[in-house]
Image (spheres, rainbow, N blue to C red):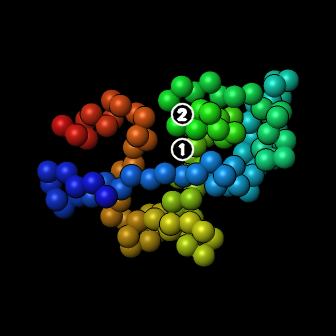
Amino acid sequence: RIYGLDTREVMIKLFCPSERIMDVAEVLRLKLKARDGSFVAFREDDIGLFPASGDSSSPLSADRASVFRSSHRQLIIDFIIRSRIRDSGAELGPSSDLGKLVSGRVPLHARDKLDTICD
């Protein structure tokens, strides 16, 4: 947790391991662009079909999960955050009591948005 100058708000920094990202992408049947230009549902066994994302802001750049662009990772993490706890999620969607208190989420690599929060 990170407390700002206003102690009524708490920022929570999240990290999602690459194995979890790949598992959830497979469950979601996330369609990624394959090397041949077609869109294929992601399967961890077929990871060789997909080119590296080339996303230099990726903390996973040396990892197998680098096939995911930043927007894909955000989509997957958002799904985890909103999923029910019994489905291995955090259950912080707009329908939960705690989820209603979440005022916003910002990817840590979005420097311009982070700067506006810190100011």
Note whether residue 35 is visible.
yes
2 or 1: mark nearer the eye: 2
Note whether residue 103 is visible.
no
Quarter of the picture holding the C terminus? top left
Relative depth, front residue between 99 and 53: 53
**Residue located at (15% from left, 54% from top):** 6
Task: Estimate the x, y position of residue 16 in percent, counting from the top left.
Answer: 54, 52
> Which residue corresponds to mark 1?
74
Amino acid type at image mark 2: Ser
> Which residue corresponds to mark 2?
58
Task: Estimate the x, y position of residue 65 in percent, counting from the top left.
Answer: 66, 41
Relative depth, front residue between 8 and 50: 50
Q: Quarter of the image holding residue 61?
A: top right
**Total number of numbered labels?**
2
Amino acid type at image mark 1: Gln
Report, in whole angstroms, how far the alpha carbon at label 2 lies from the one at label 1.
Answer: 11 Å
Asked which secondary structure carries label 2, the reply is loop
**Residue located at (27% from left, 54% from top):** 2
Task: Estimate the x, y position of residue 79 in percent, counting from the top left.
Answer: 58, 56
Q: Quarter of the image holding residue 32?
A: top right
Q: Which of the marked residues, 2 or 1, is nearer the chain's N terminus?
A: 2
Determine crowd level at label 2: few under 14, some 14-19, many 20+ residues with C-alpha closer than 10 A.
Answer: some
Task: Estimate the x, y position of residue 84 in percent, counting from the top left.
Answer: 57, 70
**Residue located at (51% from left, 59% from top):** 81
Relative depth, front residue between 114 and 83: 114
Determine crowd level at label 1: few under 14, some 14-19, many 20+ residues with C-alpha closer than 10 A.
Answer: some
